[in-house]
Amino acid sequence: MVEPTPTRSDSRHGGRRRVALAHDWLVGMRGGERVLDRLARVIGDHFEPAGLWTMFDDGQALTSAIDTLDKHAGPLSRLPARARRWLLPAYPLAVRALTRDLARAHAERPVDLLVSTSSVAVKNIDPPGGVAHLCYCHAPARYLWSRTEDYAGSAPRALGLRLFGGRLRAWDLAGARHVTRFVANSTHIAREIRRVYERDADVVHPPVRTGYFTPDPSIEREGFWLVAGALEPYKRTDLAIESAVRAKRRLVVVGGGSQTTNMRRLACKTNNVEFLGRVSDERLRDLYRRARCLIHPQVEDFGIIAVEAQACGCPVVARRAGGAIDTVREGGTGVFFDDPTPEAVARAADACPADPAGCRVHAETFSEARFDARMLAIIDEMMA
């Protein structure tokens, strides 16, 4: 006898199929949380959410879709959220606790699928027996595999990585075996998953709010360059500033972070660089609509800001690496530079094309609707 193909309403326990979510931490609204929000909406629309498991939850409101989930926080969540990056050696214990808690929940009401979104450690949750695990991977843990030097900027963290790095890498490799199927946020991360875990991954780009970030034909473009994002070492805002200073171009810097003081010091000898700090989405959209180009000097896993800018008709000057290979069409929606030098950035900015309509059309291929449809199709495949 041929078994019927499962549907979204079929379940081993009757009723709608139940999907559990896992996310590294809930301590703010950034790109990873926007992916989580869309997944929560897709799951809520088509399945029964079984809850959200996370290592840290500081209790702040994020989105309606995330806030209404039944949350299960690990034991580390009792500590201040700002301490999370100092607790790397304790992550295996935290994930083990989440594994036990998920198993208890599954015993009470069976779960049909686990979906994790991870760039740190929560993908290492071991799902209950018979439950498949889909991981949307933003990156293999950067502090272990790709940007160790960025995460070892202070003496205690550097010491911790020296003492526990090897053990944590072995644990992370073993944890990858708990994932049934990987989804990567870019072809760059798919290659990283292959390099680190020796696993293949589907590529589904993160959802971009192209319905919010839109052009405004009534606004005229101005001549300034824009750089936006956290002011952290790997973002290479210093490169954008040095380029603007040498080329004598006006640069607007949006964002804050540990490098704020250093970046202001770097620009102190010129009046061409303006620091706005963190701004609202409305202000950022206005800047995208007015800027001559967005300078994107870092190597990103995906780089959602580059797509937001294009959605507003703003071309991008990007390093030819990482997620930018997926998000920028050279000669159409932007231009690449290869050498991370101020001269190379300035030359690329001078050659940056101006095609607002083309930028918009390209950005729409990264819309929330496309993300929703692709992820729903993958979830349906795994349910079957």
Image (cartoon, rainbow, N blue to C red):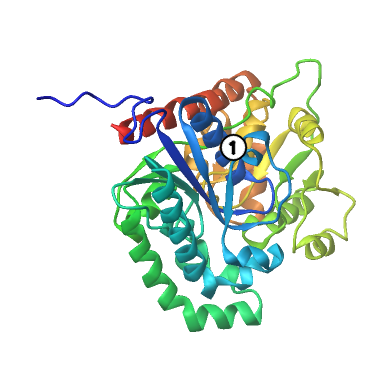
Q: Taking the image as drawn, is residue 315 in sight?
A: no
Where 272 sits versus 269, above or below? above
Q: Is residue 306 left or right of residue 265?
A: left
* Residue 322 vs residue 158, the one in the foreground: 158
Taking the view exactly as shown, the residue that stands out farthest to the left is 1
Q: Is residue 171 left or right of residue 209?
A: left
* Residue 355 vs residue 181, the one in the foreground: 181
Taking the view exactly as shown, the residue that stands out farthest to the right is 271
Image position, residue 186 (x, y; %): 45, 42
Image position, residue 121 (x, y; %): 48, 60
Image position, residue 72 (x, y; %): 57, 53
Q: Residue at x 59, y 48 (%)?
A: 71
Asked which quadrant contains residue 197, the reply is bottom left
Quadrant, the C terminus: top left
Label 1: which residue?
A: 37
Q: Is residue 192 left or right of residue 63?
A: left
Q: Residue at x 72, y 45 (%)?
A: 227
Taking the view exactly as shown, the residue that stands out farthest to the top is 218
Q: Residue at x 66, y 40 (%)?
A: 67
- Which three-letter amino acid code belongs to the residue tagged 1? Asp
Image position, residue 185 (x, y; %): 47, 42
Asked which quadrant contains residue 113, the reply is top left
